[in-house]
Image (cartoon, rainbow, N blue to C red):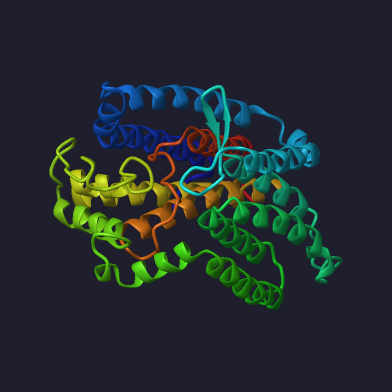
Amino acid sequence: MVVEINSLRTCYLLVLLLLVAYGLVVFYTSSFFLSLELTGNPNFLFFTRLNYLFLSFIVFLVFERISLNFLKKSIFPVLVITLFLIMATFLSPSISGAKRWIFLQGVSIQPSEIFKISFTIYLSAYLSKFDPRKNGGISYWIKPMLIFAIFWVLIILQNDYSTAIYFATLFFIVLFVSNMAFSYVFAIVITFLPVSAIFLMLEPYRVSRIFAFLNPYDDPSGKGYQIIASLNALKSGGILGKGLGMGEVKLGKLPEANSDFIFSVLGEELGFLGVLFAISLFFLFFYFGYFIAIHSNSRFKFFIAFISSLAIFLQSIMNILIAIGLLPPTGINLPFFSSGGSSIIVTMALSGLISNVSKNLSNN
């Protein structure tokens, strides 16, 4: 696909609006039964989502218009604030064995979501100064790796292993793209694998998830239930689906149907064509975001647009792979579609950063 430079911003914004609209429709159909069960009002969760979406559009406009140089200069206090927010989760109540949220006046905030923004700005600022002729040694990379390691370990200690693996994957891809020597990237990954394996084995439930993923039919009514129910929902959708609102898996048959497994609801009700449309939108989102990055007029803006696009795209791919049984079930949700106020706000903030970069593109 070839797109004129002048049309990149328009194409990107169109895909973004389609993702928001499509996600809103699928969220409504996936959440009304749960909403009715929890509150007696089938529209309660949908209206809550609309409130968060309204707030996320404001955040989008802020990040679209804010000075990127200001963000670059403000990265240290941003990192410190994010660090304190993540540490504050350890003082909050545990939910399903995890301490991922801060609760304030009935509103929950997930600081690991905010770290996506801090992570993007910090790495973009640091890597924009990289010069292979002057900074080719491993010493240049020690600082970002240490900072990343601190946040990564804290997220692990929150009992949020899946998010930690997501950030690690994102980090390694960015290092590779940044012109870091392949031997260094390879050495870092090889060092990381046994460390992540140790953290995996420290919690027996994580190991049991792996075994359930490898053979869900060994425990079809227990550990393997979610995987089997998700696959059955996708298969039952066929080509055209059962029709919007006509799915059954969301009626209490699949836990997290409006969040982690919303893709399964989409497949059941809108079929293969609906699934293909969603996947195409995510690929186009990354495609236009990537080309906005390579036509930006500075290295800093390149990394801002690239990491923001990759963060959203990688998360969507991981969620889809979980829904189709190619990754173990985790707490990774589907951007623009799944429930979660922090998630949609941060997703729109990252989208705003891409839009910010798209306002001044170069033909070079």
**Given the current orientation, which residue lies at the most extreme right position?**
134
Q: Is 253 rendered above or below residue 314?
A: above
Residue 318 lies in quadrant: bottom left
> Residue 6: where, in percent of width, then height?
52, 39
Task: Give the quadrant of residue 213.
Answer: bottom left
The answer to whether residue 298 of the structure is visible from this angle is no
Residue at left offset 49%, top offset 55%: 314
Q: Nearer the viewer, residue 54 or 85?
A: 85
Please give left or right for residue 186 compared with residue 50 in the image.
Answer: right
Query: Relative to the observer, which residue lies in front, 5 or 192?
Result: 192
107 vs 257, left or right, is right
> Residue 334, relative to residue 327: is it above or below?
above
Q: Residue at x 47, y 52 (%)?
A: 315
Q: Is residue 349 left or right of residue 148?
A: left
Q: Does residue 206 appear to the left or right of 126 in the view shown?
A: left
Q: What residue is rendered at 45% in x and 36% in y? A: 340
217 vs 293: above or below: below
Viewer-side residue, 65 vs 233: 233
- Specify the quadrant that holds the N terminus: bottom left
Give the image location of residue 313, x and y in percent: 47, 51
Q: How many marks?
A: 0
- Which residue is more in the foreground, 115 or 68? 115
